[in-house]
Amino acid sequence: MENSQEQETAVLVAVSIDKTTDFKMSEYLAELQFLAQTVGVDTLKSFTQRAEYPNPRTYIGQGKLKEVADYVEKNNVDCAIFDDELSAHQFKNIQDALKCKILDRTNLILDIFAKRAQTAHAKTQVELAQYQYLLPRLAGMWTHLERQKGGIGMRGPGEKEIETDRRIVRDRIARLKEQLQIIDKQKNVQRQNRGKLVRVALVGYTNVGKSTLMNLWSKSEVFAENKLFATLDTTVRKVVVKNLPFLLSDTVGFIRKLPKNLFESFKSTLDEVRESDILLIVTDISHPNFEEQMQTVNETLAEITQERKSVFYVFNKTDNYSYTPKDADDLTEKTMENYSLQELEEYIKIKYSPSAPCIFISAKKKTGIDTLKEMVYTEALKIHTERYPYDDLLYQL
């Protein structure tokens, strides 16, 4: 059997910053492993090193790098995946040491996006982000690109192969940006054609159940799967609650250390978030690190838009929540892992309700959905009546 038909194997490599707890580090590695699993890579082993900051030359120290290299050689590992974006210098030094394929977190996420992209729009967005990532790393990753344009006089006198490759990539980036500008204009026209209906956007960390909620609410069939970034293209559906129509959009999920290139490439997709009136920030309450995921989402939203919007915190997957009750004779302080679902809901309300209403649901079990609809309806009606002050009687029931 040829190796190309076998599942690729990988080792994971991460630097644990001094303030990062062991629990958080295990969660980070679990997420990186989930990313690898999403592209079909089998993880054999994880390597971590505690440090103040990643080594500027090799990401990890020389001793740890040799430990990884020995394992890679002994077990014939196909690739090493690093939990941070590597510089071109780091990439080359690590590749020289490990003698295997090197992937960093950004490259891995971009590869997932490339596999998930279905429409011409999404494919163009992903391709632009890939080329922007590739350009500064050309010298270390390969020595030649297949020329997309040739003929006499196309290469300057004395121009090196790598310089030609860089020119090809820059030209491709310029063309992709032009294509996206055209697409952005088309998307903007589409949004304008929708009129002034109230817009509600589902946002949140990847794989928290946004698409499942979208399908349940709008009775559509948006692709939903227990994998990261199942949704790339924003889906917009017209929804009617108590005779009040509004637009509901399902957006691409966010993630820790989301590549900056994706913000520019997915501008038109993120515009759905910018132009929405109400944000439903969906969170997987069953995830042990859900609060950090919420922080990542809020930080990402702050980068996308500075406009003040109506926000609801929607805590999903209550049916999947589990906890470890404390023994009666255990006198240690109770931690989050010991909270029952009711206790956790009380904790969340005290902490987050002052900034936004909190709703607890299970999209899978269809619990709490009516409460969510009622709360969104009340807010959407308020926005609608402000927008159309003489039309409010139509929607009073």
Image (cartoon, helix red, strand yellow):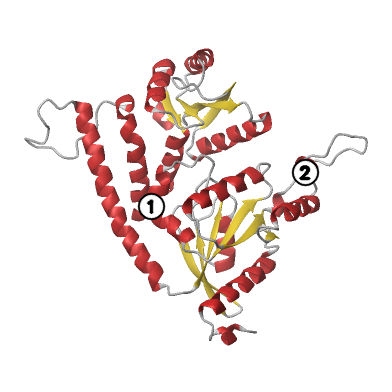
* 395 left or right, relative to 285: left
Image location (x, y in percent) of residue 303: 49, 49
Q: Amino acid at mark 1?
A: Ala
What mark, if any, has residue 57 been given in the picture? none
Kindly indicate whether the residue at mark 2 contacts the one at mark 1 (C-beta within 8 angstroms).
Answer: no
Which residue, given by chain and number where applicable, does mark 1 sit on?
Answer: 122
- Among the two numbered marks 1 and 2 on one chain, the one whose residue lies closer to the N terminus: 1
Is residue 226 visible in the rendered image? The answer is no
Q: Which mark is residue 323?
A: 2
Across and down, in percent, residue 79 comes to 45, 26
Q: Is residue 53 left or right of residue 262?
A: right
Considering the numbered disc 2 on the image, is that residue within a helix, a strand or a loop?
loop
Say which residue appears at 49% left-offset and 68% top-offset.
237
Above or below for 223 versus 237:
above
Q: Disc 2 residue type? A: Tyr
Q: Secondary structure at mark 1?
A: helix
**Does residue 216 sit above or below 302 in this rendering?**
below
Q: Is residue 138 visible?
A: yes
- What residue is drawn where x is 52% and y is 72%? 246
Residue 150 in picture, x, y percent from top left: 13, 37
Q: CA distance from mark 1 to mark 2?
A: 39 Å
Q: Quadrant of the C terminus?
A: bottom right
